[in-house]
Amino acid sequence: MIEIFLKTLPFFALIALGFQACRSGFFTAEAAAYLTKFVFYFALSAMLFRFAANLSLGEIFDWWFVAAYLWGCFVVYLIATGVAILRRRPMAEAAVEAQCAVIGNTGFLGVPMLVVLLGEAAAGPVLMVLALDLIVFSTLIVVLVTGSREGRVSLATLRNVGLGLLKNPMIVSMTLGLAWSGTGWDVPGPVNEFLAILGAAATPGALFAIGASLAGKSAERLSVAGWLSFCKLVLHPAAVALAALWLFPVPTFDAAVMIAAASLPVAGNVYILAQHYGVAPQRVSASILISTAVSILTVSAVIAWVAGYAGIVVGG
């Protein structure tokens, strides 16, 4: 456990560096926004395209993998929704809280960290988790929030959801990478080197950007935020582990990566959605802050467990 903690510590140290740089005023909020834009549209997209272009669809997509991950997610999603309803929160708030409980920071934290720690073979399972989070749950929250407000789900809502997915650079880069892979052609040497250099900026840039974004978060509504952080850091990986290791025939290595991805803290894009719809943004903000801080220990513990279970040499 200590050895794994020491291997994950540099990743969280980069987050802490970004947090302190922005909190101290050395790095302005505007600078953090442009860094995030650079990572999102360029560095991370280059990394995802390069990974996908060197994988086949069969190496990424597996029905049992999808079933196991979604089973684990929806169990926790329903628990978080049920608790919110018992607290007499409206459906829109319940949907946002459930989103906090199951959507981890896979793009900015999971892809860079897990591929480094668990090896490049982890790229396929991590991309699959990222795709499911973006496609299934980003769609679900929009449908639930707009449906609860308007009393129905219109074609315009579904069209906007579809356009949003088509404009997401992470989805676009993965799709284009798989399309290139499908041609059977190797990525030309200079292009591959260009993608490798640009993609190398994704890891430090994304982690620094996470920290910078946390500097503007507030720790209000701690009791609810603590519960949602518990859902994300404990219940979510536990439910996914139950599904991947015992209920569905998922290959051991893929299951290990899936569980590690499920252990990640609440994603920043949940806050963007909460703020956009005006639904409990402070609660989400606190959940992101608390879950990210606590995940320094919990993510290390989960990675240590799955690595031992699957016989993975972390960082080797």
Image (cartoon, rainbow, N blue to C red):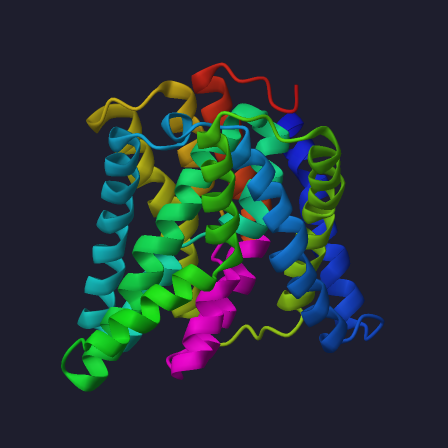
Left or right for 202, reference 296: right
The picture quadrant where one finds residue 277 is bottom left
**Image point (51%, 36%), residue name:** 180
Main SS, magenta region, reads helix
Quadrant, the N terminus: top right
Residue 202: % across, % down: 68, 48
Q: Which residues are magenta?
A: 265-293
**Image point (19%, 85%), residue name:** 150
Left or right for 150, reference 173: left
Task: Count numbered badges in the picture.
Answer: 0
**Image point (54%, 34%), residue name:** 53
Residue 101: % across, % down: 36, 57
Residue 69 visible in image: yes
Residue 221 visible in image: no
Is residue 212 highlighted in magenta? no
As drawn, which residue projects farthest toward the top?
A: 311
> Which residue is nearer to you in this view: 272 or 38?
38
Quadrant, the C terminus: top right
Residue 270: % across, % down: 44, 66
**Image point (67%, 50%), residue name:** 43
> Which residue is nearer to you in this view: 166 or 127?
166
- Please, is residue 204 above or below residue 149 in the view? above
- Please, is residue 11 above or below residue 286 in the view? above
